[in-house]
Image (cartoon, rainbow, N blue to C red):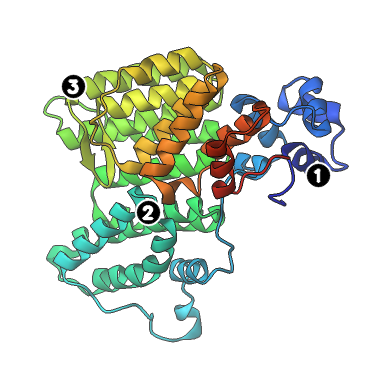
Amino acid sequence: MDDQMDIGARIRRARGKLFTQKMLADRAGVSISIVQKLERGLRKTASIPTLQKIAKALDLPIEELVGGRKSMPAAASGVVDLRRALTPVDDLLDVELLDGEPLTMRDARRSVEYLWGSYWAGRYELLAEMLPSSLAQLRATYHSVAPADAHEAAGLLARGYQAAADTLVHLGQPDAGWLGVREAIAAARNSEDMLLYAAMRISVSWQLLVQGRYEESKNVAIRAGRDVKPGKGTSESQLAAYGLLNVTAATAAARDQDSTHTDDLLEESIETATRLGYERTDHQSTFGPAKVAMIAVDCAVVQEQYSTALSVAARLRHDTTLPLATRARHLADVAMAQLKLGRTADALNTVLAIESMAPDWLQYQTLPRQVVDELLEQELSLSTPLRSLAMRLGVSRN
């Protein structure tokens, strides 16, 4: 859809002749008044749950409905090369698979660590350029290693595919991202590492959530959690994997407005994080008390419990070791809560802080842009910082 259209025009275009306004409202479970006001431009936005319901009723990703994030065109060279790396056809052309030069196991480990370091820094365009050759090298490594290293090489390939899959979603290429995460699942099975296999399903659950398939997202994470549920003698890696699956399920339950499951899953996550006692990183994901608190803030914002969100956020330590993208995403939730409670100056300052700490990440995110869009609507006289921020993010006052 045209990024210059406002949200009401996007709803009207997507609705087309398929639904009347009343039919859309009934299908989404929202009032007809909100649909009418959005389409007439009397309102420029709505609450996150309401937008999620309308997007789901129109069978659209919420990002496409709100037009709130940058995406790389499918024809961009990096994206084309990355899609090709995920879907080779050499076997159908009767030629040898054109993988790269195999890496030593040490270099393969370094390659995967660098990819994920870039991912958590939000450097998605750099990843689009690097991943095609990296995947080819990791695939060649897996095909050529000694039997003793085969399982580890499969795990490294799985993590490479996972990095590609998650990056493609951020770049606005969810179909290719889905292909990538399925390849990651297959490679993880070959690694015979159950915790890695569980970590891959965290990405599956997240991608389903991005697609608006909340119940499936929740159930995938819960089902995977059963495979790694802690018992006597449980390792810290297993605790972290189990905790991550529960908080992933909680985010999906919150977006599905399933408050009972959300609370239960968060409570289980808190118990697991308390047992672990610190922020632990395994399989390129981090879990611990701070991670659970940040997810609790996210769930509260989604359920429009804005005071609760800020109360939980205020108790978080500022020296958390969580990755940059995770901390930036948390601040986006804080900014939304501040905005909804009328603390517009705080909300603006929070988004400016995000831009300062994670400028690359910010360019591809919906939520901070939504905050800026609502600030533009509410401010009668635009301050210079807000106007400048809106211009940098490509958010215009409709």
Residues at marks 2 and 3, CA–CA distance in whole angstroms: 28 Å
- Kindly identify the amino acid type of the residue bearing the numbered disc 1: Arg
Q: Is residue 346 left or right of residue 230?
A: right
Q: In the depicted view, which residue is nearer to us: 148 or 267? A: 267
Question: Who's the residue at 37% across and 54% down the image?
Answer: 162
* Secondary element at image label 1: helix
How many numbered discs, if any?
3
Where, by quadrant of the figure, is residue 183 drawn? Answer: bottom left
Asked which secondary structure carries label 2, the reply is helix
Secondary-structure class at tag 3: helix
Q: Which residue is mark 3?
A: 275
- Observer-side mark, 1 or 2, equals 1
- Spot the residue most to the bottom: 95
Is 47 or 243 nearer to us in this picture?
Answer: 47
Earlier along the polypeptide chain: callout 1 or callout 2?
1
Indicate the position of residue 80 as horizontal and vertical percent values. Answer: 52, 70
Q: Which mark is residue 13?
A: 1
266, 96: nearer the viewer: 266
Looking at the picture, which amino acid does disc 3 mark?
A: Arg
Neighbour tally class for label 2: few under 14, some 14-19, many 20 plus, Cα within 10 Å:
many
User: Which residue is identified by label 2?
Assistant: 162
Q: Is residue 212 visible?
A: no
Q: Mark 1 or mark 3, which is nearer the start of the sequence?
A: 1
- Return the x and y of residue 66 as percentages of the image width and height: 65, 40
Q: Is residue 253 left or right of residue 53?
A: left
Q: Position of residue 215 (x, y in %)?
A: 53, 31
Instruction: Inspect the image, locate mark 2, and give the three-letter code of the amino acid beneath it.
Output: Gln
